Image (cartoon, rainbow, N blue to C red):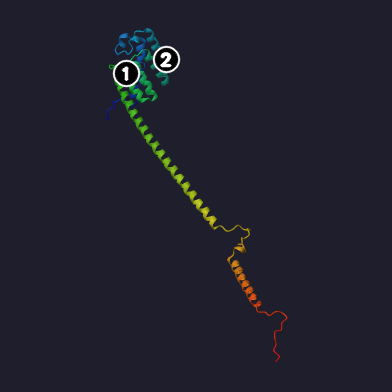
Amino acid sequence: MTEPNLRPSTHATRATTRAMRARAAIAALALLMGAPSAAVAQAPDKDPAAAADPARRARAKKLAQQATRKYNLGQYAEALDGYTRSYDTFPAPGLLFNIAQCHRGLGHHEAALRAYEAYLREKPNASNRALVQELIAEEDGLLRTERQAQAAQVERSRAEAARARAQAREAEERRAADKRAEDDRRSAALTRAPAPAGEPRRHRSVLRSWWFWTAVGAVAVAAGGSALYLDSQRETVLPGGSLGTHDQR
């Protein structure tokens, strides 16, 4: 025979916890609206003058009423503002719990922890102390998880930035290598390129040829030799018209 499950279901447990939190969320408002003054004296009062001023207490009560309406609508930022102003006006300890609840709803885990802990310091014998301690443990775990996620995100961001820098360097090196290769190809093409079609072939001037000046020099030497030979022959020629002497003996 199977034993009946005497443990409450998870859904029932969560429903009970939500109900407890809802009741605790309006504790400060009830304190301000109708609780006897002796109940306020259970926690240290940071501002005795405020407790002695009925007008300030009435303003705090009104602010807390407005904040509770916002809280019930899930408008936690507006509720937080109202509860904070109410606490500044009249520092009832229960308002610290409401402030913590607003921070929790907003996901401000560290601020929620501080407010829960401040609530227990101001009201150490609170009837919902066990619930508050449970919430503190929950928010502490969420805060640790959040910080770990933030640290992991920072590491991922650093790794992504390092990869981006490395990729940028590689791309720059590839561009530089491609440019050098292109420059080398252009230089090689210019070195091997023939003269463009249709362009007349350039000839060296005959005056710049070695064989021209060699021939000129040879002609000049030959001409000089002929002139000297003719001059020497001219010295031995007899005067024109002379028959010379003839011996008729």
Image mark for residue 101: none
Classify residue 140 as left or right of residue 187. left
Pick the quarter of the image with the C terminus. Answer: bottom right
Amino acid at pointer 1: Tyr
Look at 37% across and 25% down and name the residue there: 108
Residue 186 is situated, as x and y percent measured from the top left of the image, at 53, 53
Q: CA distance from mark 2 to mark 1?
A: 21 Å
Residue 72 lies, with reference to residue 237, above or below; the image says above
User: In the current view of this chain or complex, which residue is farthest to the front?
Assistant: 249
Q: In screen coordinates, is 216 left or right of 59?
A: right
Relative image position of residue 54 (x, y in whole percent): 37, 7
For residue 89, which quarter of the picture? Answer: top left
Give the percent coordinates (x, y) of residue 136. Answer: 31, 24
Circle 2 or circle 1, nearest the eye: 1
189, 136: nearer the viewer: 189
Q: What residue sits 48% from the left and 50% below the top?
A: 180
Residue 74 in view, yes or no: no
Front residue of 58 and 18: 58
User: Looking at the image, can residue 185 be seen?
Assistant: yes
| Label 2 vs 1, first from the N-terminus | 2
> Which picture quadrant has residue 68?
top left
* Image mark count: 2
Task: Where is residue 113? Give x, y as percent.
Answer: 33, 23
Mark 2 crowdedness (10 Å alpha carbons): few <14, some 14-19, many ≥20:
some
Towards the viewer: 1 or 41 = 41
Report which residue position mark 2 lands on. 66
Quarter of the picture holding the N terminus:
top left
Name above or below for residue 167 compared with residue 144.
Answer: below
* Circle on res. 119: 1
Horizontally, residue 73 falls left or right of residue 240, namely left
From the viewer's perspective, is residue 215 above or below residue 79?
below
